Image: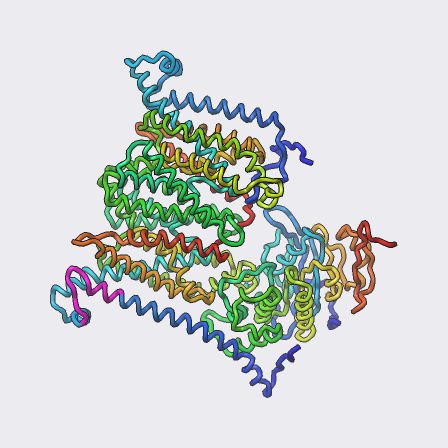
Amino acid sequence: MPQPTDQPATVAATTGPVAAPAASARHELTANALSLGYDGARIVDGLDLAIEPGAITVIVGANASGKSTLLRGLARLLPPQAGTVTLDGRNIESLPSKQVATIVGLLPQQPVAPDGIGVADLVGRGRYPHQGWFRHWSSTDDAIVAAAMAATQTLELAPRRMEELSGGQRQRVWIAMALAQKPDILLLDEPTTFLDVTHQIEVLDLLHELNHEQGTTVVMVLHDLNLAARYADRLVVMRAGRIIAEGPPAEVLTEAVVLEAFGLTARIIADPVCGSPMIVPVGRFHSTV
Amino acid sequence: MLTSVDPGTTGAPARGSALPTEAVRMPRRRQLAGLLIAVALLVLAITASLVVGSREIPLGTVLDALLHPDLSLTDHTVVLDLRVPRTAIGLLAGLALGLAGALMQGITRNPLADPGLLGVNAGASLFVVAGIAWFGVSSALGYVWFAFAGAFVAAVIVYVIGSLGREGATPVKLALAGTALTASLTSLITIVLLGDSAAFDKYRFWSAGSLVARDLGSALQLAPFIGVGVLLCLLAGRMLNALALGDDLARGLGQNLVAARIVCAVAVVLLCGSATALAGPIVFVGLAVPHIARRFTGPDYRWILLYSAVLGPVLLLAADVLGRVIAPPGEIEAGLVVAFLGAPMLIALVRRVKLAGL
Amino acid sequence: MRPRPRTGAANLTTEAEAAAPLVLARFVRHRRERRVVLVLAGLVLLVAAVSLMVGAYNLSVPDLLRTLVGQGATSENFIVFKLRLPRLTLAILVGVAFAVSGALFQTVLRNPLASPDIIGVTGGASAAAVFGMLVLGVGSVATSFMAFGGAMVVACAIYLLAWRGGVAGYRFVLIGVGVAFMVQGLLGYLLSRADLRNAEDALTWLVGSVSGARWPEIALLAAFLAVLLPGVAVLAGRMRMLQLGDDTASALGVRAERSRLALLVAAVALAALATAFVGPLAFVAFVSAPIARRLVATGSLALVPAALIGVLITTVADFTAQHLLPGALDLPAGIITGAIGAPYLLWLLATQNRIGKGA
């Protein structure tokens, strides 16, 4: 269970200078009246969301509901058309990018690996935000990279090349790279989409472990509702660029919400393995009810 | 269910390396009306080509010269010896290039296909240059066989290279293969010409893409080749419609892919080779014309080919006429005018269309 | 699940052990690149020595060494210091400039086939230079300035035209191709209007040649490179992050658009400079980086190997061009780079595409 926070669900922006982030401090990422879009079209409209520090937040929604766009906005990949994204109360656009990179890590949807790059090299690039002008590679860097790879069980893959690995292995290496950044908040855009089910569980269990042992805040977009319900501490359901429900999965996932977000008639039962809500679609032909 | 939609409200239909399959059957009336307008433009262009020039000849005199030629009158000689051949060449070359461009765009499913862009012109040029420098060729009929060979070799090279790899022939890969081939061939052409003053002198005028200084004879000699190309286009229309849906679907619809590719390739080589032999290497006509046509015809290739056959000459003749008047007392060759006008069009195309699969 | 090492004295060894495979992997990677660099540098020295020794008047190795130290005969001094060494130095400098420019373009635009000679940058230089030669009738110095200016103007135009909330690699490349064709048209126009003699001179410039090098010019070029190349070294770190895609690069703290712009400016400046001094030497920019990357094969930027390959290409081409034809006939180096580069380029394209790195 996530550590209880004694802060209210929405955080008021603090005025005045914020102290430089300490390694163990919890960082807060917030969207305030955020509107995002591309080429004039507006996809996310006036959205407020406070990411709970130390928890796993999963964003779900139908296609084109704006969930990836929202994540990209939080990750500072997309400048807001209106509203702001704040990190610890300060506008994320005004912070130096390297400083943000030491706090917020991102795994984008289809990451690009240059040809022939080795696993160790790729994970090592995650140390870039922590290195100064004249890049000194120190033993601390080595240790951190090794720890990141050990956590993702990719240490034995170190001498190999990315192109030789399977999809699941590659995804773990990318997560290792994001971990090497030592971020306090980790954003992942559909980390399980191209993986088979075994690897999906592998990756999600890894994120769960990360969250529980190191307190990393995890925010991810998932398309599988059942996995989202199982792994999320907080679920954010989106539809047409707005949040229609937010909170613990057990409270949020109701048949009404599923109908509104996905247009899907479904029954909700308790997952026989862990008790979280499980969506069972009704469909047109197979109902015995 | 395909519904008729006024194209004015749907906006630019061009999208992606696959032509829009969710379009829009254009109302037959609209297509015919557009065709009539295109034909009217063609007549206008031909007229302009006969009338406009450093020597203004009124329309009445032109008609007179055509119907009752009197060679003692300078005006008549100008019309018959200069303007008519020039116009005929513009017609034939424009026709060939427009059709070739449409064929290439259909066969490669690539909105950026053009004989110049994909290196086919460069191939024809290289072989023509070799012909001039090493084989002493100087007649259009002589050029044309070299031009065919060169066009064929270049087309094969570009297509094969561009389609290697997972995704097949994406627009960028083809364009780059074509440009790289053009760069390579231009380099080789330069090497051949460096040592041979006479050849260079001939080449530098020829490569500007001029419709002038040819006699009607060369046009007549090449007309049969273009004619065969046009006939093949009649077959190609249906094939290209099927191909536009993708290889798998096309096969599923019973289209023989190999036959389609061969027919189109032969047509492209005949048309491009002839056009280059007639008028030198001309870029962008093959690119622009099908796109303009598509605005009016929708995705049906039979109509696109028909429109391209008419609009190609319109574009080329208009460029030629423009070239005659914008730089008095000299002229700017049609090929150069088109290069200057066509490049902005390509740029506009790349800017506004979100080319999928790049 | 393997237990995660916890900090503490007893586990420092565990951490060091854990880091060992990383250190090894890095060592192997660097060792390979070092080896490639050493071999290439050796080859460059070899070619340089041969270029200085062989010619209408041959020097032996001891003669050469003596002359270089300053103790040679007058005639040897003349041959080495006034004829061969300037030419060699110029070839080396432009080889580096073209190769690094090509490497930057190809990495920043994320397309192994993008290159300044393909996307109209050197074409712009050529058109401006030919304009200067044929229309304005200026001398060679002014021609060089015009070439430089032409390349910068064209590159700016392409960048601005490709800008749509950011510059995507493919847009830049395709618009560059369009501009290249337009520039080709302009060149054709200029060549067809001039009289034959002048047009032939222009054609010779267009082929690209290293002859006629003089020390003041070389010093100028070296000065420019002394500013640009360290700049590139500073930006190299950002470029490595850009290799991972814009999203990941931004997540790692790199401002993608700004870095891309800075790198493109450097790349254009390098290509423009080199073209201004020797003309558009075909293909050096295009092929140097792909060859280097293939030799090193570790996914690193391989800028130094690319530069060395560029040097090798230009020096070998120049040497071959000088001595290919019997008698005193000197071919321009561009002929060799063109004749060899053209088929090689197509082969490269074919294999790049086949293994899925085409676009």
Reply above or below: B338 against B169.
above
Pinpoint residue A68: horizontal percent, then vertical percent. Answer: 65, 56
**Residue C7: quadrant of the picture:** bottom right
Q: At 18% from the left edge and 69% from the top edge, which residue is drawn?
A: C64
**Residue B55: quadrant of the picture:** top left
Q: Coloring scheme of the render?
A: rainbow
Q: At 53% from the left edge and 54% from the top edge, which residue is drawn?
A: B166
Side of A183 where A246 appears, left or right: right
Pinpoint residue B227: horizontal percent, then vertical percent. Answer: 44, 29
Q: At 43% from the left edge and 72% from the top edge, which residue is drawn?
A: C30
**C199 and C217: which one is in front?**
C199
Pinpoint residue B148: horizontal percent, then vertical percent. Answer: 38, 38
Side of C97 where A238 appears, left or right: right
Reply above or below: B357 against B283.
below
Residue at the right extreme, as displayed: A289
How many discs appear?
0
Q: Does B45 lie within the magenta span?
A: no
Pinpoint residue C52: horizontal percent, then vertical percent. Answer: 21, 64
Reply above or below: A151 against C151.
below
Residue at the left extreme, as displayed: C74
Q: Does C52 lie within the magenta span?
A: yes
Quadrant placement of the N terminus of chain B: top right
Q: At 31% from the left edge and 62% from the top edge, which residue is drawn?
A: C312
Does residue A128 appear anywhere in the picture? no
Reply above or below: A162 against B20.
below
**B335 and A40: which one is in front?**
B335
Instruction: Give the residues drawn in magenta, as a range.
Output: C47-61
Does residue C62 appear anywhere in the picture? yes
